Amino acid sequence: MSEQPYVSHSDSWESTATIRNRPRRVIEDDNLRYYPMNRQPLCTHPVIVQLDQKVQDLILVQSLYKYINDIIIFETEIVNKTAREIAKGNFPFLFPFDCRYDAMSVVIDEDYHAYVAMNYMHQVQERTGIAPIELPSEIELSRAIPRALCTLAPQYQAGMELIAVAISENTVTAEVAAFSKDPSLKRSVKGLMVDHLADEGRHSIFWINLVKHYWANIDEEARIVIGGAIPGFIEAYLTNEIQMLFDHRLVESLDISEVLMEKIREDIPTSYPITKNHPMIANIRNFLKRSGLSQHEATRTGLSRYF
Amino acid sequence: MKVLSIGFLGASTLATTILNMLYDLGHNVVVLAGSGRELVTAAEELGIQRHTAKDTHIAGLLDVIVVFPESVGKKLPKDGTLIKLSLSDVFVNTERHGGVVWRFCTNDQQTILAQGIYKFGDEICGANIVGGIEQLAADLLINSINNAAKTNGLWPDAVATALPPSWSTELNMARLSVWHKSNETVKEYSERGSIVHGFSDAAARYASRTALIDESNVITYRELYNRAVSISQEITEIYSEKGLSLNNETLIGVALPKSARLYATILGILGAGCAYVPFDITHPQERLRAIAADSKLDYIICDSNYDSGLFSDEGVQPLIIPEFRWSPDMSVNVSAFPSAELLLRDTSRLAVVIYTSGSTGKPKGVMLEHRNLLNLCEWYRHHVELTEESRPFQFSTIAFDASILDIFPTLLSGASLIIPSEADRHDFLRLDELVRTHEVTHAFLPPALLAALPDFVWPTLKHLVTGGDICDPDTISKWSASRKFHNIYGPTECTVLATTVLFSDSSYNRNIGKPISNTGCYILDEQFKPVSTGKEGELYIRGRGVGRGYNSEKNLTEERFLRDPFSGEPSTMIYKTGDIVKWRDDGNIEFIGRRDTQVKIRGFRVELGEIENAILDTRIFRHCAVVVDESKRIRAFVAKPYKGDADEETVKQALCQVLPEYMIPRFIIVLDELPSTDNGKINRNSLAGMDISKSLVTGDELTETENRLLEIWALVLNIDTNEIGKNDSFFDLGGHSLLVSRMILAVKNSFQGNATLARFMERPTIAALASLLTDSTLKKGAQISEAVYADMILNPSISPVGEENPFLRKPKAVLLTGANGFLGTYLLEQLLRNTNAVVYCLVRGSSQDEAEQKLALSLLNNRIDYRVDNKRIQLVVGDLEKPLLGLDISQFEKLSLELDAIYHNGAHVNHVYDYKYLFNANVRSTLDVLHLATHKKNKSVHYISTLSAASKFNEAGWLIEDGPAEIPPAFVNNGYNLTKWISEHLVWQAISRGIDATIVRPGNISGHSLTGLCQPDKNRILLVLKGSAQLGIAPAWDATFDLCPVDFLAKAIINCTLSDTRDTKVLHFHNPTPLDWTTYVMGLTRIGYEIQLVDPGLWRSRLLDIDESNALYNVVSFYLDENNEDIGDISSIEHSRTESTLQKVGMAYPKKDNALIDRNLSYLVDCGFLPLPRQPSTERSFVA
């Protein structure tokens, strides 16, 4: 695979980074929702549908809190851990200065996203008076990445971490894009997503370029070993456990009788099959193609069920 | 950072793009009055308020107004600060650039806010350049606005102008957007006047060279010319003899076999100044007649072998020209064509009307003029290097437009046209011989023929042309070796072809190349805007090939032949092809498919050609065609395998690797060869309609459950039912995590069964889900769907209103539902007796009279002393199954003002129907009653439930006088009980919200204490009694048996509910005095029945054999289980609170003695419910 020279995104960062260009999102005084109905199936449960509209609203607000909490964990604990190490030259694989410099801009963007998300969460609490229920302290990636790393010898762990972060950065991008199109949502919520998306577009390319550079500079054995660990990572990444636990907790927080809770809980799915039609798999597949990983025969074979 | 308020005045895509960008950035945007529709629509989609011209103060609310070039001159709000865009066009050192300037304008001055230039460079597509300039303009403005937002609304300092004055030329973006280098095709050819002149010139120049070679003749140009002239003279004479006029519009049919004579005749018709209408005599007669009728021919030229009567119905006369009129001296030209002079002046004279298949099945005649044909001839002669040495082959039938490509360019070049006979055309070996013998140099052969031809070696064939359908890669590879292989594309309407490309071994088969001379292609999106490279759009063709339109199809002509909106000349026409194409980077056009054959499958747009290509790429079969059948299922037909082991399955497996699931054909069928039409195209219509049932191994027979599931899946997945197979995985059909819950819940809402998610996930198919739902091993009681639980919740809006009503216990007006039922009539009686209230009786009926008669009859049958015309009885026609109890709004409103209490006694009593069926009458009616009770003023609600719906037990296992439990009553398989249980929940919630309500639970309502009168057919226990009597055996159940006379019950209900001092909101009205079931049953023997008490198991086993004649038949399912609690052992039913309330109102339970039992049983005999006993009872005389 021939490698293209790395081109820094610093110029476009100056003119397009949301931290530099976007006003704060302020909650509007309207009846639109805080979270898309179609991302929270609980709202369509026949029991919930019969309950007061306030119950649905409560579920949506709590779901937004969880979403924001996930963003904060993802940006500050997952992406920025890796990005900061790359920027400071502490990552076990040394990237060229341009990459490191760009990585620092990613750190800024992601921390800023976390700040904006916290600010918005604060605004929602002020306006609705709804306090968040206990939010998860980790996201799926918090478990999936260490789990993937511990299967590998130390010299391959950094590479796997890089690819895992790159995969998740690319998946989240498309997820956020879908979010921002819902007409029943408040403009400020959508704006939050649009802002996020504006930076993530740049990040997605950044991570792809880093993976390309890394992949081109490691030996075949490393490619085989790391490529072989990707399927396990994807499987662990796309689990539903944390969401399921949260949904259970959310149901328990509702002011309804135990029997109704039980009926709703019975319908919270425990897991979903991960097939090539899984909505996030399409994004992952796209990443694998764009980063060149899918052109690696052994890696592609391991991932064949997603293609 | 400041949020800016920005006004927009514009009408372009650029304006819309920037509006969306600024909205996304978080600024307030307003579209000003006077903006174009595109911008206004964009604003509506964003939910932005629209500014109207009346609002003159808008400028004061805005930081700035952005004005786009297209809106310069529109009225602007007063005192606004403006940012104006200007776009300019200039050549710097012969290189073209687009200049972008944003000017900042206040009342007194203009400064430059931002500017930039865009270099056209080597770009060949104008739409791409426009996109680039728009991007630049947007970036410059957004950057300025970002700066202003950062500096709290301060605009950046003016940029010093650096652009030369020549930049002031305005850039026409609309014109630029349609420019494409591939459309620069202007080429002037020498003036020839008409096809007739072109041929005459060639005949003079190459007089002695061979013009035509057919089966039996070799004819020189001079001979052909002489024959053609003489035919045209004969035509002229015939018309003149008949007094018919020959004009620009005169059409003459030609129906001759392929021979020298055919071509002489065509030239003869043209020479007479007429247009020819070609008939392929091998086509079906029906089609030929339709063409003759549509073209309104006077004459059709044919030979004596032809059935001359064929067109008599259409008024067309056969014209048989017996022999060519030979000039006395064939060595010299006899004379000129009669119309030569005329044609020279008028190149727009009609030359040919060629019929193609219309989508409606009726052929449509495409009119082409001499000028159309001439441009084609000139371009083609140069493009394929036709000279007098060339020997083109005329394979196509003259009814197909490709024949024009063979005939006229050849005869204008002095070349020799090689004509196969009909027999040659259908015999590969004869074809091969002909091509080799005559050393054919040029040929048009359709793709289907090329694909089918054996590997002939034709070294003299230098130019092979194909088109009209997609070539498969195998064909391209085979025929492009050692010659020029041209792919042509074009509708007949644009004179045979509009674009062409030279195919080589590796060419992409959907590349249709670039426009030919004097022809242009627009690729436009649905808004009629040119698309950029790589984007799909519909192809529109302009230029000299665009024909006149359709013969006698004015509407269709106007639909397909449009004025060119981009040319500036009103007379220029473009043809709307209906083909979806895209520009490639190299300036060629790629064919995507027909607009009308694109199919949407599961919401995805599917291009059948893409599937065909994928199949061909698998290299399993050489040929394939993909069609969609009537049910929108994709069928792929394949033929000619590469290897012996190729079959449907290998193709399917290979496709699964490369295509998304929705594009995988439902059926793959192997044929020996693909059927083709007369024109050599694959006959897709016949494939779409082909009966393939024999080719399929398995059918998709569905059960009723599966069919219902199919409907749900289709709805949830938003796809058509016929796109779902019963063994397709939900996830393969596009289902995902969010949809699976929705689907399962939809299933739960419409099925009683309990399909758990966990089990569904094991095998997510319709077939598996159906078997889960119909699984008979599921335990009873586990089958209550979530919908039932959802109904349990009382709408939050139902709660007490306003002041307390002092008349709740001393009502002035009462509503009684089910007033004509058994208990209802006695309740009515008691209400009339114990209150002064007017009693509104809700009775179902198609009219007031009918309802009145019903109530009157019930009162009579139940021996009630009151008559229906009593002033205190007010009849209300209603229906519990209908919304608002079947009342109209005004009745509902009136009652809600008058009533003080409601006795909700009515229900649909049925022990067989399921919950859903009974829902309206039994649950929704309760909701309506509660609604009525809290509408306008507060009312009491007394809900008549049943003890079998009681659900709350104490620790000792006693049913207690309390609200319902969340655990359903024991008999959950009984829909009726469930409706009562759910209604109790609704009433109980109403009570908890402060509504004065009571739940009354009667037990076994038995006959009148004095007369035994009852309505036994609806009482399940009496059905058990009767059925047992019929069998001669009864189960020896060990249970305390209830017997609660209806008159006592009604009196107790009314007295207790009206009592101010009662202790409970829940009343248990059974009769707790001791009586066991066996004593009751054995009462039958006293009145003469032979009946034995047997072990319940034995009794149950007998039930398996009963038929409709047994009274138990309809309710048998309740008694087949060992754990039947239906009879209800009343020994463990709490009644202390009810009993104390009874005491307070001065009532006591009636005794269940033999006299009461016998009065009951005797009534059952007297009314005919029980069969007469065998021996008359000695104690019958007791019965009153």
Image: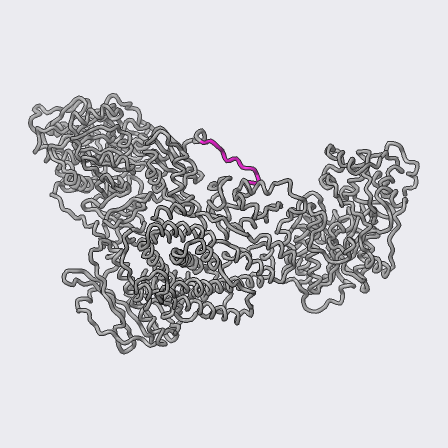
As drawn, B514 above or below B319: below
Residue B851 located left or right of residue A267: right
Residue B497 in percent (x, y) is at 23, 41
Q: Identify the residue at image location x=54%, y=43%.
A: B709
Residue A116 located left or right of residue B383: right
Residue B40 in percent (x, y) is at 38, 62
Q: Quadrant of the N terminus of chain B?
A: bottom left
The dominant secondary structure in magenta is loop
Question: In the image shown, does B632 or B327 lie closer to the viewer?
Answer: B632
**Farthest-out residue, bottom:** B108
| Magenta span includes B90 | no
Look at the image and tell me whether residue A33 can be seen: no
The image quadrant of residue B1083 is top right
Colour scheme of the picture = one colour
As drawn, B936 above or below B2: above
Look at the image and tell me whether residue A277 can be seen: yes
Residue A80 located left or right of residue B389: right
Numbered disc total = 0
- Which range of residues does the magenta coloring cover? B696-706
Question: In the image shown, does B146 or B111 lie closer to the viewer?
Answer: B146
Question: In the image shown, does A133 or B482 lie closer to the viewer?
Answer: A133
Residue A54 in percent (x, y) is at 58, 63
As drawn, B892 above or below B628: below
Q: Identify the residue at image location x=53%, y=42%.
A: B766
Q: Identify the residue at image location x=68%, y=49%.
A: B847
Q: Quadrant of the C terminus of chain B?
A: top right
The image quadrant of residue B560 is top left
Residue B295 in percent (x, y) is at 28, 35
Question: In the image shown, does B725 or B829 lie closer to the viewer?
Answer: B725
